Image: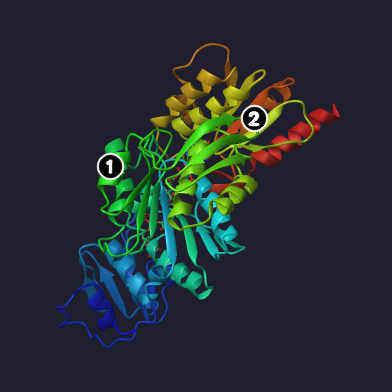
Amino acid sequence: MFLHELLEVLQVYQTANIPTRINITDIEMDSRKVEKGSLFVCIKGFQSDGHDFALEAEKRGAYAVVAEQHIKTNLPVIYVPSTVKALALLADYFYGHPSHDLNIIGITGTNGKTTLTYLLNSIFKAHGHRTAVIGTIDMTIINERYPLSNTTPDALFLHKHLKMMKEKQIQTVLMEVSSHALHLGRVFGIEFDTVIFTNLTQDHLDYHLNMNDYAYAKSLLFSQLGNNYKQRKTAIINVDDRYADVMMQATGFPVVPYGLSDEAFVRAKNIELGANDSFFEALTLHSKFQVHSKMTGKFNIYNMLAAIATSECYDIPSETVKNALEQSNGVPGRVESVKAGQSFAVIVDYAHTPDSLENVLESITEIKKCKIITVVGCGGDRDRTKRPKMADVAMKYSDYTFFTSDNPRTEDPKAILKDMTGHLSGDRFRVITDRKEAIKQAIWSAEKDDIILIAGKGHETYQDINGQRHHFDDREIAKAYIEDRLKE
Ligand SMILES: CC(=O)N[C@H]1[C@@H](OP(=O)(O)OP(=O)(O)OC[C@H]2O[C@@H](n3ccc(=O)[nH]c3=O)[C@H](O)[C@@H]2O)O[C@H](CO)[C@@H](O)[C@@H]1O[C@H](C)C(=O)N[C@@H](C)C(=O)N[C@H](CCC(=O)O)C(=O)O
Ligand SMILES: Nc1ncnc2c1ncn2[C@@H]1O[C@H](COP(=O)(O)OP(=O)(O)OP(=O)(O)O)[C@@H](O)[C@H]1O
Ligand SMILES: N[C@H](CCC[C@H](N)C(=O)O)C(=O)O
Ligand SMILES: [Mg+2]
């Protein structure tokens, strides 16, 4: 592809010093991946600055560089105001606008994104679509799984893999869109067809200045839905959330409000929440049907309503939606039971925010027969202000809590635990830094009909300590200790 085409994409017309007939064979944002013929885009990061690697890119054979500040190199340099946006636009063009030919459903919100991608994936598959999922657990293209290091990968990765999906005749892509991704322009240039807002509660206040700043980042998904009103696009919004209006105001496209209040176009009535299942009657503008799901918790009713609202926009028959929801076994690491024949329940859940922890504990409280024992920690290098709040939530609902490490990352685990528990007193909790030991003690302390909640790491199969990932799976560890105890 000639450089002049890419310059047009960036609307850079003063090209006197740039030989425009250079043939660009690849676009890279990481100097270590540059090969002969690449266009290297310098991105300012949190650890390093891509502008410092232009020389390395040149040595590796780059043909040109895109930068937002002055750099020294013998290569032609295209200066732009934002290299992040330039990267997204270039990638979109270079890979042939793949998002235009795919049905892309973007989901944002503090909690429920992964769950919703799974529910929608089941529904769209049942409707006969070839699907792909991009999110926290991995990227799945039909049945092939690819690990990801971010919930929402960078723009270069996204446009490249959307092209791959198009080549594999994927029709529908279900994609989690994190607030970091929106703020850092990772989804810039992606043509979404449907966008969904689940909810907004506290998280990531290490990154966003405050809740309004966080809400603004989320609203970008709605404002970036486009402005070609001839296209069929929809925003599906949880109308019960206090930030619903922020999302609604950000788009001019039709909004389908869902929730439990009367304003919702897609609602649930006669909700019954069981220990391992739930029942409700779904009411939409066009249909009414009953759902008996294997998932429980009021928050999962919201997730199912969002899935129903979305399906209706695609005219998926309610029978298909009902069957897919009823057959869904939920999501790995989300309210996942660990069973090895013990007389008490063990639930592993990914709740890592005050609100999700409260939701899951509230649901467990509704079904409890005896004590609730919680094992929970907070991740390092993340929002510190959520730590005491999560501890308070754990104490509010649990008879006994083991506070322990999550992923300490580069922080001292003891300092994280001090942030969580420094203000607590009494004898209803213990601090055990070693997560394995905390799980062991929780399992050995449980009595018949108690419920143990192991929160925070869900599906994760590692623990990040000082940048080193060690194999660690709450479900495996819990199961092993239950089996040990049963042998006694
Ligand atoms: C804070 C943040 O989002 N950081 C992301 C960022 O990394 P960074 O800014 O540290 O990058 P950097 O190492 O400084 O590098 C800057 C530039 O220099 C380039 N470089 C660097 C070294 C070199 O030798 N040559 C070179 O060219 C890099 O390729 C890059 O273009 O860019 C990386 C590549 O895209 C991301 O993987 C990384 O996410 C890190 C791992 C992360 O933890 N992010 C979290 C906060 C995050 O994004 N989370 C959300 C989910 C949140 C949620 O909703 O729960 C997510 O979407 O994952
Ligand atoms: N709609 C919801 N509202 C509130 N809490 C929820 C909702 N759905 C799930 N949860 C809780 O939040 C946890 C995380 O759910 P899920 O993984 O679906 O969210 P997510 O938005 O993908 O999170 P992340 O930002 O980490 O990717 C679950 O384990 C559950 O405890
Ligand atoms: N996507 C979230 C995941 C948090 C999971 C929790 N186990 C932790 O490590 O803090 C984040 O990066 O903040
Ligand atoms: Mg997720």
Q: Name which residue lies at 40% across and 75% down.
A: 95
Q: Amino acid at mark 1?
A: Val
Whether 327 is drawn above or below 164: the answer is above
Please state the total of marks drawn on the protein image. Answer: 2
User: From mark 2 to mark 1, how far is it between C-alphas?
Assistant: 35 Å
Position of 4 with respect to 300 (left or right) is left
Q: Is residue 352 visible?
A: no
Q: Name which residue lies at 46% across and 56% down.
A: 175
Q: Is residue 245 visible?
A: yes
- Going by the picture, which residue comes out furthest to the bottom? 21
Are there few (<14), some (14-19), or many (20+) residues within 10 Å of tag 2? some
Q: Amino acid at mark 2?
A: Ala
Whether 260 is drawn above or below 107: the answer is above
Colour pattern of the rendering: rainbow
Disc 2, SS: loop
Whether 483 is drawn above or below 367: the answer is below
- Going by the picture, which residue comes out furthest to the right? 487
- Report whether the residue tagged 1 is closer than 8 Å to ligand 2: no
Nearer-N-terminus badge (2/1): 1
Residue 56 appears in which quarter of the rendering? bottom left
Disc 1, SS: helix
Which residue is identified by label 2?
275
Q: Position of residue 123 (x, y in %)?
A: 56, 54
- Quarter containing the N terminus: bottom left
- Quarter containing the C terminus: top right
Q: Which mark is residue 406?
A: none
Q: Name which residue lies at 70% across and 21% down.
A: 445
Q: Position of residue 384 (x, y in %)?
A: 40, 33
Query: Toward the viewer: 452 or 114?
Result: 114
Are there few (<14), some (14-19), or many (20+) residues within 10 Å of tag 1? some
Q: Position of residue 235 (x, y in %)?
A: 35, 51
Q: Which mark is residue 246?
A: 1
